[in-house]
Image: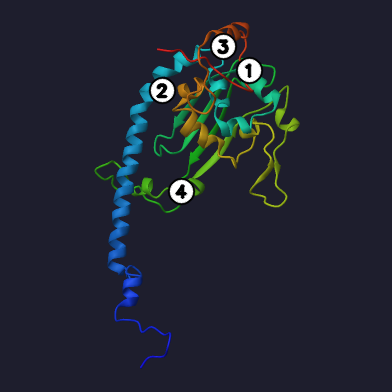
């Protein structure tokens, strides 16, 4: 007779309670899953590269159109939340207002590495008409390209690490108004990998590292979706084209406020 209050477990009760708790993955199956993941990533990489190549003519067609629109790129950038957070100083925005073109040049061998080109009109802040930041691809030591597969992907392309294989390089010089000295980047005393103050946005060009991932956000988000950001369909607030807004726009048509960039949307 069993003790009072104690229930005897029936055979198989533990398995019924946790039927998925005893799954064992053999080494052979683990290798097969890894190979499948690798195959999946290879195809995914090929699709990403193909998309980048197919979009290039679209970006080239877009380039002269948006360049002809006053302050297109400053407004598009400021409508990106992350960028706006780190471009809050008024002088940064005044300098940014001279930006007339933004371009992304992909590395010919490794498309995930790129150079950002900021083309400026003549301005009182720096003599350069071109500020650029390069995220240079450095192939890992000992890595071999190998033969390309059916998707034109090599082993070297597949074995890619952004932190390990890309080195930011800077080509910028401030001449008249040194914004990076006025607003320096300040590291966090408690965590050297973090910032207590990002300072001027233009530290982005003067310093090699990019702890805020501004370059990645610009190249992967703002640049491909630039028109949506400019129109306020992404990031910024949208404005309906009612009569009251039209009157306000007419009063301010000569200047776009970069602190709160808003663009009237046309109704179709």
Q: Residues within 10 Å of mark 4 (few under 14, many from 20)?
A: few
Front: mark 2 or 3 = 3
Side of 114 where 17 appears, left or right: left
Return the residue at label 4: 161
Which of pointers 4 and 2 indicates the residue nearer the eye? 2
The residue labelled by disc 1 is: 257
Circle number at residue 244: none
The CA span between labels 2 and 1 is 26 Å
Q: Quadrant of residue 121?
A: top right
At horizontal 36% and vertical 22% (from top left) the residue drawn is 57
Total numbered labels placed on residues in the image: 4
Question: Distance of mark 4 from mark 2, alpha carbons?
Answer: 26 Å
In the rendered image, which residue does mark 2 sit on? 59
Q: Nearer the viewer, residue 96 or 208?
A: 96
Front residue of 39/12: it is 12
Pick whichever of labels 3 and 1 is earlier in the sequence.
3
Q: Position of residue 70 (x, y in %)?
A: 55, 12
Q: CA distance from mark 3 to mark 1?
A: 15 Å
Mark closer to the chain start, 2 or 1: 2
Q: Give yes or no for contact between labels 2 and 3 (Cβ–Cβ under 8 Å).
A: no
| Local crowd size for mark 3, using a 10 Å CA cut-off: few (<14), some (14–19), many (≥20) | few
Which label sits on residue 245? 3
Q: Is residue 13 left or right of residue 127?
A: left
* Inter-mark Cα distance, 3 to 4: 48 Å
Of callouts 3 and 4, which one flags the residue occurring earlier in the amino acid sequence?
4
The answer to whether marks 1 and 4 mark residues whose Cβ atoms lie closer than 8 Å is: no
State the residue lying farthest toward the right: 182
Q: Is residue 51 left or right of residue 104?
A: left
Residue 21: x %, y % from top left: 36, 70
Res. 146 visible in picture: no
Estimate the x, y position of residue 126 in percent, counting from the top left: 67, 22
Instruction: State yes or no: discs 3 and 4 in contact (Cβ < 8 Å).
Output: no
């Amino acid at each position: 007779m069993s003790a009072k209050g104690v229930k005897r477990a029936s055979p198989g009760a533990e398995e019924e309670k946790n039927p998925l708790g005893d799954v064992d993955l053999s080494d052979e199956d683990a290798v097969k899953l890894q190979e499948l993941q690798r195959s999946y990533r290879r195809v995914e990489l090929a699709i990403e590269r193909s998309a980048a190549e197919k979009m290039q003519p679209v970006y080239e067609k877009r380039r002269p159109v948006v360049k002809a629109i006053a302050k297109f790129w400053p407004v598009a950038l400021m409508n990106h939340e992350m960028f706006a957070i780190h471009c809050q100083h008024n002088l940064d925005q005044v300098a940014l207002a001279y930006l007339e073109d933004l371009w992304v040049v992909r590395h010919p061998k490794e498309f995930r590495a790129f150079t950002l080109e900021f083309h400026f009109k003549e301005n009182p802040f720096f003599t350069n008409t071109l500020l650029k930041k390069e995220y240079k691809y450095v192939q890992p030591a000992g890595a071999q390209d190998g033969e390309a597969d059916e998707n034109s992907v090599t082993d070297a392309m597949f074995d890619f690490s952004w932190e390990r294989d890309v080195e930011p390089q800077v080509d910028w010089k401030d001449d008249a108004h040194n914004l990076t000295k006025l607003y320096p980047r300040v590291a966090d005393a408690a965590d050297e990998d973090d910032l207590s103050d990002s300072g001027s946005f233009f530290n982005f060009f003067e310093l090699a590292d990019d702890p805020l991932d501004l370059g990645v956000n610009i190249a992967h988000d703002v640049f491909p979706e630039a028109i949506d950001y400019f129109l306020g369909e992404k990031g910024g607030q949208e404005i309906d084209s009612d009569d009251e807004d039209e009157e306000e726009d007419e009063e301010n048509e000569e200047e776009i406020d970069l602190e709160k960039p808003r663009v009237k949307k046309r109704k179709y």
